[in-house]
Image (cartoon, coloured by chain):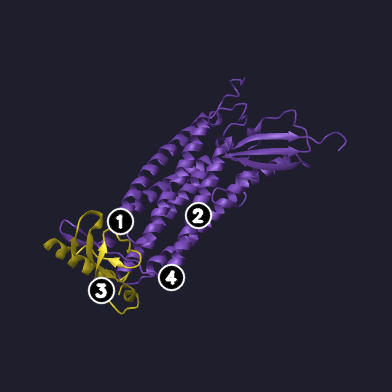
Amino acid sequence: MLARLDDDGVDLVIAPFRKGTLLETSAALSPPLATSGHGEKAIEWRAAMKNGENRWISLVEASARDAGARR
Amino acid sequence: MISAAAARTHADELPPALRETLKRAERLEWWNIAWTISIIVVMGLVLGQSQTMKTAWIEDTLGLVPPIAFLVAARMERTGQRSRKFPFGFERVNGLGFFLASVALAGTGALLLWDSAMTLIKAEHATVGSVRILGRDIWLGWLMIAAQVYAMIPPMIIGRKELPLAEKLSDKLLHTDALMNKANWMTGAAGIAGIVGLGLGWWWADSVAAAFISFDILHDGLTAIRSSTAELVDGAPRALASAKLSDDAEEVRKLLEQRYPGATIRLRETGRLIRAEVHGVHPPRDYDGPEGHWPGEPERNWRLAQVSFVPDAKGK
C-alpha cells in the first residue's frame, strides 16, 4: 500500500509502525493517531502520505494531533 | 639563541594604525562566529526535508572555517615570534588560511550545486509539514522562513563591515570571509524563495533557487582558490577581489624597472606583504629601504616589506 502512495493511486495509508520507524524519507508520516504497548516495542498508528503534498500533509497532521489528543 | 630583533613578531613591524585595524577585524570575527553558531542552532531546529534548508545549514557550518582561519592567522601574526624553526615568522599563515577559506567557499558552492541538481534529477518532493505551538497548527515553512530571515541579517551586516577592513589590511582571507557571508545571505534569500515555492506546490522551486545561486558562490570560490594557490607557489601578487595581478604590485614593478633598467624584477606576496627581488644589479649606494621604492600613498608603504638585490655571479 505504501508503494502505491508514489504512483498517485492512494492519498493516505493508516498503518501501524514501530516507534522510531525511519520512513520519513520515502513517505511523510503524521503524528501518532494511537499508540499501543510501551517502550521500544510500542506500536504507533500513523497516517502515511506521499512526500511533497504539503497542504494535504499539514491538514492530516493537524487532524492526527486532534485525534491523538482526544484518546 | 634568537636576538631581540629576531624575536619580534610580524605584527610588530606593521604600523600601529594597521595593528589596531587588525584587532578590530579580530573582534568582528568573534562576533561572526557567535552569530554563525546561533544561526546553525536556529536553522537546525526547523530543518525539515527542504533541500535548500539542509544545504543552507551545511553552508552556515562551513561558514565557520574562514573566521576561525582568520583568528588563528591573526593570532600567529601577533604573537608568533621568529625562531630557529620558523626564521621567517608566521606572516604566511594568513595565506594558508586564505587557501582553506577558498576551499570552504568553493566546496559550499559545489555542494549546493550537486544537491540541488540531484534533487531535480530524482524529482524529490520535499515535505514541509506542520507543528503545533501553543495549541495552533503552524506550517513549518513559516518557521523556516523566519529562521532564514534571521540567518540572513548577521552575514549581511558583518560581510559589509569586513570589506573596508579587508581593503585596509590587504587581507584576502578576510575578503574571502566577506564573500562567504555574501554566499550565506544569498542562500538564505534562495531558501525563502524555495520555501514559498514549496508552499505554492512547486516542488522544484527549492532546488532551482539553490542551483541558481550556487554558480555565483562556486565562481567566487574558484577565483579565490586560483588567487590563494598563486600566493602559495610564489606567484606574482594578486588583486584582493580577483585572480588578476594586483595594481599595487604592478606599480612597484614599473618603478623598479624604471629605477634599475635591465634588471629582472620578481615579485611575490607573503600574506599581506609584497616582496621584491631585483636580479642582475647591485644595490645602489644610497639604498633607502623598501619604503623608498613604494610608488603609492606613503601610509600604505608597509605593503612593500622587502627589496632584495641579486647581482649576477662574476663572469655571467
Evaluate whether label 3 is on the same chain as label 4.
no
Specify the subunit that label 1 lies on. Answer: B
Q: Which mark is residue B122?
A: 4
Q: Which residue has dot 2 on it?
A: B107
> Which circle, 1 or 3, is nearer the viewer?
3
Q: Position of residue B238 (x, y in %)?
A: 60, 48
Task: Point out the tag, 1 or 2, that comes first from the N-terminus.
Answer: 1
Evaluate whether label 2 is on the same chain as label 4.
yes
> Which circle, 3 or 4, is nearer the viewer?
3
Q: CA distance from mark 2 to mark 4?
A: 22 Å
Task: Point out the tag, 2 or 4, that comes first from the N-terminus.
Answer: 2
Contact? badges 1 and 3 (CB < 8 Å): no
Q: CA distance from mark 3 to mark 4?
A: 22 Å
Q: Position of residue B266 (x, y in %)?
A: 70, 42
Q: Amino acid at mark 3?
A: Leu
> Which circle, 3 or 2, is nearer the viewer?
3
The yellow-coloured chain is labelled A
The purple-coloured chain is labelled B
Q: Residue at x 47, y 45 (%)?
A: B66
Q: Which mark is residue A12?
A: 3
| Other-residue count near label 1 (Cα within 10 Å), few / some / many at <14 / 14–19 / ≥20 | many
Residue situated furthest left in the rendering = A70
Contact? badges 1 and 2 (CB < 8 Å): no
Q: CA distance from mark 1 to mark 3?
A: 25 Å
Residue toward you, B241 or B202: B202
